[in-house]
Amino acid sequence: MGYEEQLVKPEDRKGDALALYAAFGATGLFLLVSWITVLINDPTKVPWFSLHPTLQSLALSFIVYGILTLQPTSQPKTKAAGLSRHQLAIVVCAFPIVTIGTFAVWWNKHIRDHDHFTTWHGKLGLLCICWVLLQIAIGGGSVWFGGAVFGGGMKAKLIWRYHRISGYILFPLLLLTANFGGLYSNWGTKYLSLPIRVIVYAIAPPVILLAIYIRVRPSKMNIF
């Protein structure tokens, strides 16, 4: 391979860097406030529940990073590196964390004999974690071992494109779940003032979503 072929060309479009900073800034605010709120209000009183907002906010942060790290990658070298980081963030970090966080709140209700999935936050959360599991199965199947599960080659690449589209549909639902949990839940209303809840759980999520969508490359999702 020649020297010129080894060079990595700039891939950012105008506005991509600003969108990246906006996404990380809003995500950092969301994560920081969620953790501080739990930690300063004696999490040992409700240890199982305390795992829920902390772990779910951490998992969502990994998901945001996992998406951003693939945007924009259009060259073989950057695609391979981005995919590795994406899988590390989503499969190795986010999914186990969000699973534990989901189990924690389920167990907290179970030991207190409370009904499960009675709110929109709970119902959307259940939908999202099932969807994330499906996303991992389809995404992994389309790239692991050359996408052999789906026939490899162009067939696997087509499945990957569906996986990408599905992810961009799922992501707003994840943010909406976080919005419901922080803005309207008993936990949020008890420990946070309305202005803080609005900034962190009503404004930050749309900022994250807009920033990520600004960096989307529609050409990567051409399925026809």
Image (tube, rainbow, N blue to C red):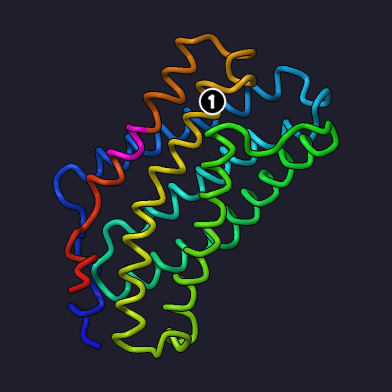
Classified by dominant secondary structure, the portion drawn in magenta counts as helix
**Count of picture labels:** 1
Query: Could you tell me the amino acid type at mark 1?
Result: Gly
Task: Please give the range of residues in magenta.
Answer: 206-210
Question: Residue at (54%, 25%) from the top-left corner?
Answer: 182
In reply to whether residue 189 is colored magenta, the answer given is no
Question: Residue at (35%, 75%) from the top-left corner?
Answer: 159
Question: Residue at (38%, 89%) from the top-left corner?
Answer: 152
Q: Residues within 10 Å of mark 1 (few under 14, many from 20)?
A: many
In reply to whether residue 207 is colored magenta, the answer given is yes
Q: Is residue 4 above or below residue 48?
A: below
Give the position of the N terminus as an image quadrant: bottom left
Give the position of the C terminus as an image quadrant: bottom left
Q: Is residue 171 above or below residue 206?
A: below
Q: Nearer the viewer, residue 98 or 126?
A: 126
Q: Position of residue 30 (x, y in %)?
A: 49, 30
Q: Kindly state the secondary structure of the residue where label 1 is placed.
A: helix
Q: Is residue 214 left or right of residue 202?
A: left
Outermost residue to the left: 14
Residue named by callout 1: 182
Q: Position of residue 50 (x, y in %)?
A: 72, 31
Q: Position of residue 218 (x, y in %)?
A: 19, 59
Q: Position of residue 193 (x, y in %)?
A: 53, 9
Q: Is residue 2 left or right of residue 30?
A: left
